[in-house]
Image (spheres, coloured by chain):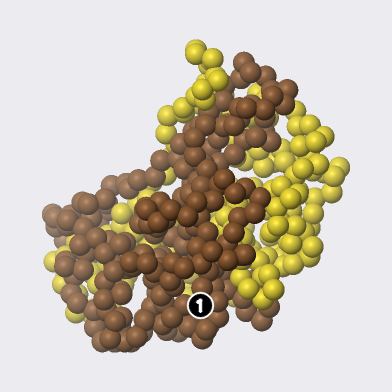
Chain colours: A brown, B yellow
């Protein structure tokens, strides 16, 4: 933890719990990555996957932002799970339940020999089992893809959970309902592509959702 | 649109369609905000709301990042909706369906006289109707809150939708199922707080979810 990742104001919302950190990262597939380019902030959404005590992101070797990051720029990567809306008896005390992590670091480029394994880690995270249903990656595809690795070293995790704070009486009307409305995320029914032959069985990697 | 928001590589994934932009922003409540502090990227998740042709974010006047932004630093704000996983017949062509916007700008601080209206816009977006169920904001609460406004001027929107690309034959096995697994997001059953009296009716602002 550094000055940048030490949460000053709301110390009780900061936790550094490896199991909770891994659970958050392993339950999400979308990250937002921030970079500095010529003094200006840049931000992009990306898929990611945890690989042990690092996270992996990937993209085209032609993509500008990952190329910049590969050149040694530091980046910030944030993953957030929105868990619920917190209805207090004042707007001021109303809030959101969430789990959020921000990771800062200088990414390293995964070297060619380790690239296929890293891409399989990403694939397993996003579509578990899919790699066994489709053909292997080609050398051309591997060459066209860059994979970056960011260690889980400079990490700040913040969470809020549970009911609204009800301790302080700020003139609220206590006859009003207060509580939490949870966010629920899941998967809908799979929809086959036009060229998928009628009657093709939905494979295990899709049924798993 | 500027150099920073012109999508070079995947021009067909960039759209500048006001209706689609508003639909994305009005369907999400979580943004990620990137700032530059002493040359380093900082990124934080925040609730946001669209207000006409701007977006609003808010926080405590004691919060460091919003104070920095209020001091005239440029920021990037990204809102992303993950719509589905796209199963192609190769890992390389597999993808995600999403709608994503990145907004760059120097935020302005909403002045005291307009702050209550701005906070009501945020409240209506997050918990429609709630402001009529609870007591009004107090002067102390208004003074403790900073609201920033970022115009929807420098905006880049990218989307992917529909089936996997099946045009090019890269040696895929065409007997394999391909298609899309949609992401479904909704609200779970509301859960009352400990001090909510038994039998208190769930209010309209909660039933609306």
Against A128, is A57 above or below?
below
Is residue B98 at least partly visible in the picture?
Answer: no
Q: Quadrant of residue A122?
A: bottom left
Q: Looking at the image, which residue is at 70% across and 53% down?
A: B63
| Residue at image coords 16%, 72% | B173
Quadrant placement of the N terminus of chain A: bottom right
Q: Work out whether residue A31 or residue A206 is closer to the camera in this orientation and state it.
A: A31
Circle 1 residue? A106
- As helix, strand or loop, the secondary structure at mark 1 comes to loop
**Residue B36 image point, x, y percent:** 67, 70
| Rendered location of residue A151, percent (x, y) | 43, 71
Provide residue B193's location: percent of width, then percent of height.
52, 25
Residue situated furthest top in the rendering? B199
**Which of the 4 image quarters holds residue A61?**
bottom left
Residue at the (27%, 61%) spot, across then down: A127
Q: Chain of mark 1?
A: A
Q: Nearer the viewer, residue B41 or B77?
A: B41
Toward the viewer: A175 or B122?
A: A175
Q: How many marks?
A: 1
Would you call the spot at circle 1 few (<14 residues within 10 Å), some (14-19), or many (20 or more)?
Answer: some
Q: Residue visible at 16% across and 61% down?
A: A197
Tell me: residue B78, above or below residue B133. below
> Measured along the vertical axis of the image, is residue B22 above or below residue A86?
below
């Amino acid at each position: 933890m550094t000055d940048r990742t030490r949460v000053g104001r709301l110390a009780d919302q900061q936790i550094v719990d490896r199991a909770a950190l891994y659970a958050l990262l392993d339950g999400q597939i979308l990250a937002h990555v921030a970079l500095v380019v010529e003094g200006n902030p840049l931000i992009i959404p990306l898929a990611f996957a945890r690989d042990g005590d690092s996270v992996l992101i990937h993209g085209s070797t032609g993509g500008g932002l990952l190329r910049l990051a590969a050149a040694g720029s530091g980046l910030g990567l944030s993953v957030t799970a929105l868990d619920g809306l917190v209805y207090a008896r004042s707007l001021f005390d109303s809030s959101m339940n969430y789990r959020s992590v921000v990771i800062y670091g200088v990414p390293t480029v995964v070297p060619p020999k380790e690239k296929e394994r890293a891409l399989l880690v990403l694939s397993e995270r996003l579509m578990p089992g899919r790699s066994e249903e489709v053909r292997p990656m080609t050398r051309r595809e591997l060459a066209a893809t860059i994979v970056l690795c960011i260690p889980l070293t400079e990490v700040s995790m913040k969470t809020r959970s549970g009911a609204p704070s009800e301790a302080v009486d700020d003139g609220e009307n206590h006859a009003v309902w207060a509580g939490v409305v949870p966010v629920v995320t899941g998967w809908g029914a799979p929809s086959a592509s036009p060229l998928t032959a009628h009657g093709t069985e939905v494979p295990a990697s899709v049924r798993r959702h």
